[in-house]
Amino acid sequence: MKTLLVLLGPTGVGKTEWSLLTAERLACPIISADSRQIYKGLTIGTAAPNAEQLSRVRHYFIAKLSPDEYYSASQFEDETIALLENLHQSHDVVIMTGGSMLYIDAVCKGIDEIPNIDDKLRQDIQNIYKTEGLDTIRQQLKLLDPVFYGVVDLKNTKRLIHALEVCLMTGKPYSALRTNPKKERPFRIVKVGLKRERVELYNRIDLRVDEMVHDGLIDEARGFYPQRHLNSLNTVGYKELFDYFDGNCTLDFAIGKIKQHSRIYARKQMTWFRRDKEINWINLSENSVDVLEEILKLKEKAISNVL
RNA sequence: GGUGCCAUAGCUCAGUUGGUAGAGCAACGGACUGAAAAUCCGUGUGUCCCUAGUUCGAUUCUUGGUGGCACCA
């Protein structure tokens, strides 16, 4: 049986570096599970692998889409599963690395089949929301799917709108489609998590932001300023600079906010990790561990456990 | 050196007519199924500068300190 080695961890922990070394050792490609690095041009601000790193190991899902293209965890699931079927023909192990936990879970566990929402319906509901407000959305959802209405966070606009979209699109209650299937994959999944002491992680994040600025983050962001309304640009590292370009704050303030928001992002990721009991952790703050050997050891152990 | 004002959460500050205190920001915790670096929810973490007094009881009033700011020398 083939293996998917998932290398995860909070932003700034060192995933890129260790995934490269591991991939070189195993002579395998890397699938990136990152909802922002997938867009072209968001290079410095998302700490995407650079040209030199990309030349060392074949990467997938890096700089693949134009920033105005729609994408979703479900598409990522489909495309990755199809890609793995191919890659596993020539590789026993394929590495997947990234910080977008919804994407990782979509591949590892699967998500429900829900039809695509057509653009007109999406637009119509947006218009209702804009002209009549969230309460109208709530009331419609309450009628069409009282079950989900009872569970959902009634202040979360995105979730409410999406649930209503699905109800109207399918003619069925959204909750009826949420079966939470445990999809069986034709490959073994080994999850290795990289972590560091919090203070150290925060220091690394701060330092990395300073490096990004030094490497030209401000110019990169300025290039996207006209496209700031796009979802792909609603991203830490860019939205703070857009505020600076607007004249709402100083550059130093914006950079400080990028650091702060990156730290919050890292914490949110760790919250997600805590409930995933399948992750085998390696603490990079402990100098004594040989990280690469540790990763390979965890992989071997997981493989022999299954056999 | 003199006079006045100030000292409360990590920061900026409210407040308690005397019954040990609360906002914003920060920080921290959580949720998460086709926008997820998104979106949303929750939590006050405190020698109320120190000392002595008055009082059943002082962060609050009084005395004396300490530190900061302003003005006068």
Image (spheres, rainbow, N blue to C red):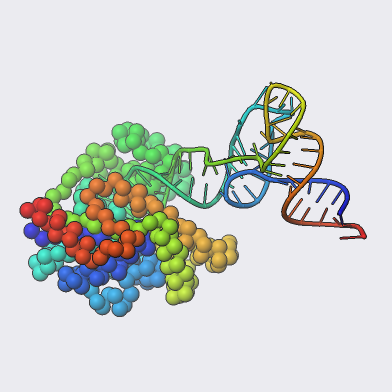
Residue A227 visible, this angle: no
Give left or right: position of B43 versus B18: left
Across and down, in percent, residue A276 comes to 26, 48
The answer to which image quadrant residue A293 occupies is bottom left
Across and down, in percent, residue B32 comes to 32, 45
What residue is drawn where x is 27% and y is 58%?
A282
Across and down, in percent, residue B20 comes to 61, 31
Residue A17 visible, this angle: yes
Residue nearer the viewer, A174 or A29: A29
The answer to which image quadrant residue B72 occupies is bottom right
Residue nearer the viewer, A225 or B22: B22
Across and down, in percent, residue A264 comes to 43, 54
Give left or right: position of A15 versus A85: right
What residue is drawn where x is 22% and y is 56%?
A191
Give left or right: position of A154 versus B44: left
Count numbered badges in the picture: 0
Compared to B73, does B48 lie above or below? Answer: above
What residue is drawn where x is 44% and y is 71%?
A212
What residue is drawn where x is 41% and y is 64%?
A204
The answer to which image quadrant residue A285 occupies is bottom left
Residue nearer the viewer, B41 or A6: A6
Compared to A38, does B22 lie above or below? Answer: above
Q: In which quarter of the image is the N terminus of chain A?
A: bottom left
Residue nearer the viewer, A306 or A297: A297
